[in-house]
Image (cartoon, helix red, strand yellow):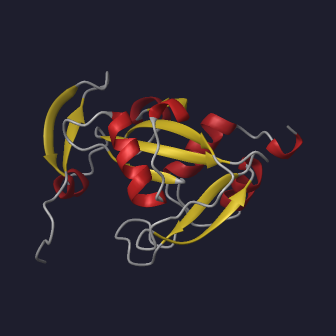
Amino acid sequence: MEQTEQEEILDLVNERDEVIDSKPRSEVYALGLRNFRVVNLFIRNNKGEIWIPRRTAHKRLFPLCLDMSVAGHVESGESYEAALIRETHEEAGIVVDVTQLKHLGKATPHEHNMSAFSETYELTQNEVPNYNPHDFCEWMWITPSDLLKKLDAGEPCKSDLPKLVRLFYGQVDTKTE
């Protein structure tokens, strides 16, 4: 398979999230490594619902699965915040500044059984994002508790989605907030 773009290089980190090496993304996945960095964003409206998209069928990993509002790799030498700003624009068509974001927290492979070192943020917005149709094919606004019910009932999703929703939103029904 011929590549049309240069492959992403990802930093590998130790348990303290300190860079120890770098490898091409394909090699990181081929080796089953979990010590790389990702960012996640949940877009939440004033009703307490989060915007959850479904990945397109052509995605190599998790095709047609529910996803975080925005999710992406932190490239080598890039900060979590810079990656989040880049990914939010690429996937959701939203230009954000870190001052608009609420930092929900960090999750790691060794503490939370995540697929990678993850920093998760929240953006309050009532409008549906102008999402990239190459990334997502449909979407929904849904409360965290209803999303967890859907996922527990077998709705296909990225493996970290239910972990992040439980970690940062718990089982609370936000419709009553």
Is residue 73 in view from this perspective? Answer: yes
Q: Which residue is drawn at 15% across and 66% down?
A: 5
Q: Where is residue 121 in the image (x, y as percent from the top left)?
A: 52, 37
Q: What's the residue at 16%, 59% (across, down)? A: 7
- Left or right: 132 with respect to 162? left
Q: Where is residue 92 in the image (x, y as percent from the top left)?
A: 48, 58
Q: In which quarter of the image is the N terminus?
A: bottom left
Q: Quadrant of the C terminus?
A: top right
Residue extending furthest top? Answer: 16
Pick the front one: 97 or 36: 97
Of residue 27 and residue 141, the one placed in the foreground of this image is 141
Quadrant in the picture for residue 66? bottom right
Q: For this view, does 169 lie left or right of residue 121? A: right
List x then y, in percent, for residue 139: 61, 67
Q: Residue at 45%, 48% (x, y): give it.
A: 95
Residue displayed at 63% across by 56% down: 51
Tell me: residue 80, above or below residue 141: above
Q: How many labels does the image show?
A: 0
In this rendering, position of residue 15 left or right of residue 20: right
Residue 101 in sight in this render: no
Side (left or right) of 164 relative to 34: right
Q: Where is residue 76 drawn, in percent x and y?
A: 19, 40
103 shown above or below 40: above
- The image quadrant of residue 165 is top right
Q: Is residue 59 above or below residue 123?
A: below
